[in-house]
Amino acid sequence: MKISLLKLAHARSGDKGDTANVGLIALKDEYYPLLVREVTADAVKEHFGPMVKGEVERFELPNLHSLNFLLHESLGGGGTLSLMTDAQGKTFSTALLRMNVEIPDEEAAALGLAA
């Protein structure tokens, strides 16, 4: 089944120059392995498409049940240079939570995610 990250995590984002920084935090500890498996750097880059011109780096924080992503070259030069509406990357967290992941029905049921 496809499930939105909004049902699995919450997120926060910001900026460092031309790089958006997005933290993804599991809503429940048991969701973290699913996030690690499904929310890869490549999947995040594909989700954001042409908005991210550089690479996407992922860092795992298992003690916090969180992932942190750096989306390089995604803010049009950064806060003081960019003409983007969100030059400081504040809405990138909401955009990431709209990403869907595909999980087996059995796993969804075991995690209490099945409809």
Image: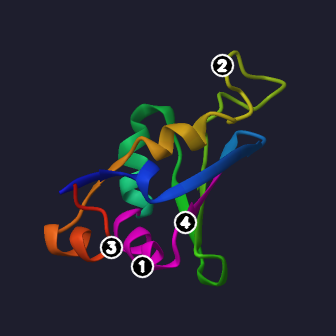
- Amino acid at dot 2: Met
Label total for image: 4
Of mark 1 and mark 4, the one earlier in the sequence is 1
Residue designated by label 1 = 33
Which range of residues does the magenta coloring cover?
Answer: 22-39
Q: In this view, does 108 lie to the left or right of 44?
A: left
At mark 3, the secondary structure is loop
Residue 58 circle label? 4
Where residue 7 sits in the image (x, y, percent)?
A: 42, 53
Residue at image x 16%, y 74%?
106
User: Nearer the observer, disc 2 or disc 1?
Assistant: 1
Q: Quadrant of the N terminus?
A: bottom left
Distance in Å between CA atoms under marks 1 and 3: 11 Å
At mark 4, the secondary structure is strand
Report whether residue 21 is seen.
no
Disc 1 + disc 4, Cβ < 8 Å = no
Residue designated by label 3 = 111
Instruction: Determine the image quadrant of residue 88.
Output: top right
Q: In which quarter of the image is the C terminus?
A: bottom left
Instruction: Determine the image quadrant of residue 110.
Output: bottom left
User: Nearer the observer, disc 3 or disc 4?
Assistant: 3
Of mark 1 and mark 3, the one earlier in the sequence is 1
Residue designated by label 2 = 84
